[in-house]
Amino acid sequence: MIRRRKLPEPVRTLEGLSVVITGRLERDGEWVRRDEARRMAELAGAQPRPQRARASYSDDLLVIGSSAQWKHGDYGAQEERVLDLQAQGSSIRIIDQDGFFALLDGGWAYPLSRDADPVAYPDDFIPYRPVEPDVEVTGYEWNTTGGGLTEAINRHRELQEELAERLDHEGLVPLTPASSDCAFDVPWQDPRGLLHVVEIKSLHSVPVLRLGIGQVLDYAVTLRERGYTVIPHLLVGGPPDEPAHWRAVVGTAGIQLSWTIDDLLRSRDEP
């Protein structure tokens, strides 16, 4: 279960950050040399410091690698130095190797601190990955919903990003599915251990509603077979015709239907 008391603002990019890397980094069972990690950070737009550099007041990020001795709250010399720098007013933050690799992959990283639980991700999920920026789609006729494909894709992106930001603001950790067989948009796990899965549709025509209901129901059943207790949500871009009818339809399958993010967040506590 993901729990957090007071998690700091997530790091969303390495672009332009001064980064110090300490310890050995491990990814997928393979060790990553520190000089290789520095090159990775540089390719992502960071300003990595020399290999044996000490964290300084003007640095932005300390990446701590894997260690048999280190555990959350049991800091080494570099981490203790960062605490001192933070006490002096520095904005430097600490992330672990998982957060570092998440940033390299375009995701978020939650800084470590002594007044917050570390973030632990369920097996089937990874740190949240923001969606691609606005796109322009040409050479494709979008004729099932009455809307333009480019507009629909970009509206979908806006809804997904807004939901992730709202969850983070409320102290919840937005996630991304780790595999393509459950490619819904924004999952999160609440303090009760319930897994919320959200399928987003930017439009709200009858074909889109039917498609979204089928998709999120499929995802919910798949995840329940893996042992999760799931609350499925369908978020659409506006109120459908005959809202009462569609509420009744989704209600038979235990799906929460919303057409605003406020409505979705209110419905999350419903049984």
Image (cartoon, rainbow, N blue to C red):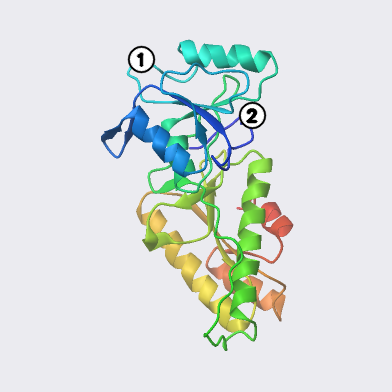
- Residue furthest to the front in view is 50
Quickly name the residue at label 1. 69
Where in the figure is residue 193, as x and y percent of width and height? Answer: 51, 41
Residue 113 rendering spot, x and y as whole percentages: 57, 23
Characterize the local packing of mark 2: few (<14), some (14-19) or many (20 or more) Cα atoms within 10 angstroms: few
Q: Toward the viewer: 254 or 170?
A: 170
For mark 2, give the secondary structure. Answer: loop
Q: Residue 148, relative to residue 82: is it above or below? A: below
Q: Residue at x 35, y 34 (%)?
A: 36
Instruction: Identify which residue, 246 or 36, lies in the foreground.
Output: 36
Q: Amino acid at mark 2?
A: Lys
Counting from the top left corner in percent of width and height, residue 173 is at 56, 42
Q: Residues within 10 Å of mark 1 (few under 14, many from 20)?
A: few
* Residue 146 visible somewhere in the drawing: yes
Q: To which residue does mark 2 refer? A: 6
What kind of residue is marked 1? Gln
Quadrant for residue 234, please give it: bottom right
Q: Position of residue 100 (x, y in %)?
A: 46, 36
One can see residue 203 in this view: no
In this image, 78 relative to 240: left or right? left
The answer to which quarter of the image holds residue 246 is: bottom right
Please identify, in this view, whether the residue under mark 1 or under mark 2 is nearer the observer: 1
Q: Is residue 47 left or right of residue 227?
A: right
Q: Is residue 271 above or below residue 200?
A: above
In-front residue for pair 17/199: 17
As drawn, 245 above or below 30: below
The secondary element bearing badge 1 is classed as: loop
Sequence-first tag of 1 and 2? 2
